[in-house]
Image: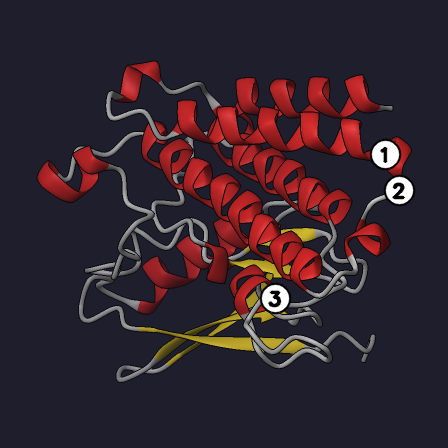
């Protein structure tokens, strides 16, 4: 083989898909998407009692475990992986924004994720973010949306639009910032804050963090029409990054 490792995701389709042809067609469509910020769907396994999608294995785990995880050297309080510095977090945010923008604006018909959360953001060997579990809404009778990430209109009345994904993305943005703040606080407490920031870099980083937090707040507006599109989100993040270079 070509040395690609595969991850298997069992899908609880529960009769939502009538037959193997329909399942194959939908998985085939998801497998046709080519974007560096999406985890490639490599194939599927089908039997009458079990269906699974086969995805490329991504080596560095998911964003949630990296941000909150206890299993990293020198982290006792759950500040996560010390490799996840701000520039990497920012790059993850921009990558996931580009992946969602591709699903929303470049795929015809449009693909909605509707289950965006930090456990569905996988990190490759360079800590670039890749989005998994996209486009599964058609295959699954009930997606167990993660509490806190779900847009209010989806939770209350199942009104579905691309703005639901924008809301969830906003929550992820704020998660990236808040966990960073906790990590920085732990460094200050240990007296090792200077390791974290070069003095010259600090102003830029603080500016970026504030801009990202503001964007997260706009994305999580209660009113869907007030949220930007994912294309606009990408533009904002690229402007923030270019302003710091």
Discs 2, 3 touching: Cβ within 8 Å: no
User: How did the renderer colour the structure?
Assistant: secondary structure
Q: Which residue is mark 3?
A: 66
Of residues 223 and 41, the one drawn nearer to the viewer in this rendering? 223
State the mark number for residue 201.
1
Q: Looking at the rendering, which quadrant does residue 82 occupy?
A: bottom right
Q: Residue at x 26, y 55 (%)?
A: 147
The answer for how far apart the CA atoms under marks 2 and 1 are is: 5 Å
Q: Quadrant of the N terminus?
A: bottom right
Q: Residue at x 20, y 36 (%)?
A: 152
Image location (x, y in percent) of residue 58: 67, 68
The answer for how far apart the CA atoms under marks 2 and 3 are is: 23 Å
Of residues 85 and 38, the one drawn nearer to the viewer in this rendering? 85
Residue 101 appears left or right of 220: right
Q: For mark 1, does the 10 Å Cα neighbourhood hold few (<14), some (14 to 19), or many (20 or more) residues? A: few
Q: Which residue is mark 2?
A: 198
For the question of whether residue 35 can be seen, the reply is no
Image location (x, y in percent) of residue 135: 41, 49
Q: What secondary structure is found at the residue carrying circle 3?
A: helix
Of residues 82 and 241, the one drawn nearer to the viewer in this rendering? 82
Image location (x, y in percent) of residue 9: 46, 74
Q: What secondary structure is found at the residue carrying circle 2?
A: loop
Q: For mark 2, does the 10 Å Cα neighbourhood hold few (<14), some (14 to 19), or many (20 or more) residues? A: few
Q: Quadrant of the C terminus?
A: top right
The answer for how far apart the CA atoms under marks 3 and 1 are is: 24 Å
Image location (x, y in percent) of residue 94: 65, 36
């Amino acid at each position: 083989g070509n040395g690609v490792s595969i991850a298997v995701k069992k899908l609880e389709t529960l009769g939502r898909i009538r037959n193997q042809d329909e399942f194959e067609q939908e998985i085939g469509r998801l497998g046709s998407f080519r974007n560096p910020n999406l985890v490639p769907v490599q194939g599927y396994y089908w039997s009458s009692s079990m269906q699974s999608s086969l995805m490329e294995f991504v080596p560095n785990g998911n964003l949630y475990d990296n941000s909150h995880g206890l299993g990293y050297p020198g982290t006792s309080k759950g500040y996560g992986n010390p490799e996840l510095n701000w520039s990497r977090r920012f790059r993850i945010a921009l990558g996931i924004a580009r992946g969602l923008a591709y699903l929303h604006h470049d795929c015809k018909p449009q693909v909605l994720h509707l289950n965006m959360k930090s456990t569905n953001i996988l990190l490759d060997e360079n800590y670039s973010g890749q989005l998994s579990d996209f486009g599964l809404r058609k295959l699954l009778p009930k997606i167990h949306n993660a509490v806190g990430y779900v847009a209010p209109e989806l939770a209350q009345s199942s009104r579905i639009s691309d703005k639901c994904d924008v809301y969830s993305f906003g929550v992820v943005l704020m998660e990236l910032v808040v966990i960073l703040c906790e990590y920085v606080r732990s460094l200050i407490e240990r007296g090792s804050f200077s390791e974290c920031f070069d003095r010259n870099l600090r102003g830029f980083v603080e500016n970026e963090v504030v801009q990202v937090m503001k964007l997260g707040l706009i994305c999580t507006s209660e009113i869907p029409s007030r949220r930007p599109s994912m294309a606009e989100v990408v533009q904002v993040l690229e402007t923030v990054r270019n302003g710091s270079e």
